[in-house]
Amino acid sequence: PRKIILDCDPGHDDAVALLLAQAHPAIELLAVTAVAGNQSLPKVTHNALGIATLAGITAPIAAGADGPLQRSAEFAADIHGDSGLDGVVLPEASVALDARNAVDLIVELVMTHEPGEITLVPTGPLTNIALAVRREPRLVERVREVVLMGGAAHLGNLTPVAEFNIAFDPEAAAEVFEAGWRVTMAGLDVTHQALATPEVAERITAVGGPKAEFMTDLIAEYGRRYSDVQGFDSPPVHDPVAVAIVIDEELGGGHVELRRAPIAVETKGEHTTGMTVVDLRPWVQRDVPTAVALGLDADWFWGLVTDAVR
Ligand code: BDR
Ligand code: CA
């Protein structure tokens, strides 16, 4: 299995990413690291511990950055609520928070594993990852790749062109995209294909048991909010798409369409800060370490999520 560190800000869709990463046999979850994003660091860390209890995650869970590198934090309470995970009942956490800082834990794990062994899967703002590379620049050669949820090659969500995870901390995102390691971006172009339709929700509810109940409440609440705020009929469940890309790679591919392309993060725009500028011009040099996901086999994806709930 592929060894990953899931760096997240749970968050409804982060919770689904955690369930999938824990359950799928192609993934070995080495650690969960929390970062401020959808809500404050204490809230998302609390949520991570509760989800870990529900999902049976035994990997260490550590808290990291409590806000962007340079900017002030603007949480996503409109989508995820005051708790960061409104509308679901979390079990009381039976797992304890790791004493190490998330940034230290990322550095320690990557440096004590073989080169090319660990894949980083960030599904929140990229603050922890940028701080880890600042602390230990050799991470860049040592990590197998970074497969992240964030950005958009076309329309944004927080602004016309910027996606939330990148716009929350654009300076951190720029450092991560520029570092020189392999970065695969699961942005809105692909995550808007991962829609939790009523049929999907029914399939998951039919599984039964505590995880299915949790997922049923989660999809209902998240769907209401996405409908109110962004006008979606069915909500896009972004974060598990990054985990699914790692699973697809590990199993030989075929369910996700990836395209290599230069990607730059705008940090100084008047109207475009937080934009991921993905160069999809066909005549531009493709020999770059960055790639963007453009297509997803949604049936296959929801099969993975349903199996994870089961
Ligand atoms: C991203 O922002 C957060 O609200 C979600 O958890 C996801 O990671 C989507 O733009
Ligand atoms: Ca997230």
Image (spheres, rainbow, N blue to C red):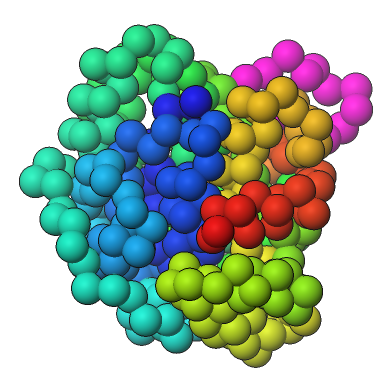
Residue range (magenta)? 279-291
Q: Position of residue 285 (x, y in %)?
A: 79, 17
Instruction: Give the left or right position of residue 32, taking residue 104 as reference.
Output: right
- Residue at horizontal 61 percent and vertical 53 percent from the top: 307
Q: Quadrant of residue 256?
A: top right
- For this rendering, which residue is in front, 195 or 133? 195
Q: Quadrant of residue 11?
A: bottom left
286 vs 65: above or below = above
- Residue at horizontal 60 percent and vertical 68 percent from the top: 207
Q: Position of residue 45 (x, y in %)?
A: 26, 61
* Total labels drawn: 0
Find out whether residue 307 is within the magenta segment: no
- For this rendering, which residue is in front, 284 or 300? 300
- For this rendering, which residue is in front, 259 or 57? 57
Residue 55 in sight from this viewpoint: yes
176 vs 163: above or below = above
Find out whether residue 287 is within the magenta segment: yes
Which residue is at the far left?
99
Q: Position of residue 234 (x, y in %)?
A: 73, 76
Q: Quadrant of residue 115?
A: top left
- Residue at horizontal 70 percent and vertical 53 percent from the top: 303
- Point out the image quarter for the C terminus: bottom right
- For this rendering, which residue is in front, 125 or 172? 125
Instruction: Give the left or right position of residue 46, taking residue 240 as reference.
Output: left
5 vs 37: above or below = above
- Residue at horizontal 35 percent and vertical 20 percent from the top: 139
Q: Position of residue 40 (x, y in %)?
A: 28, 68
Instruction: Give the left or right position of residue 123, taking residue 307 as reference.
Output: left
Residue 290 in sight from this viewpoint: no
Magenta segment, principal secondary structure?
loop
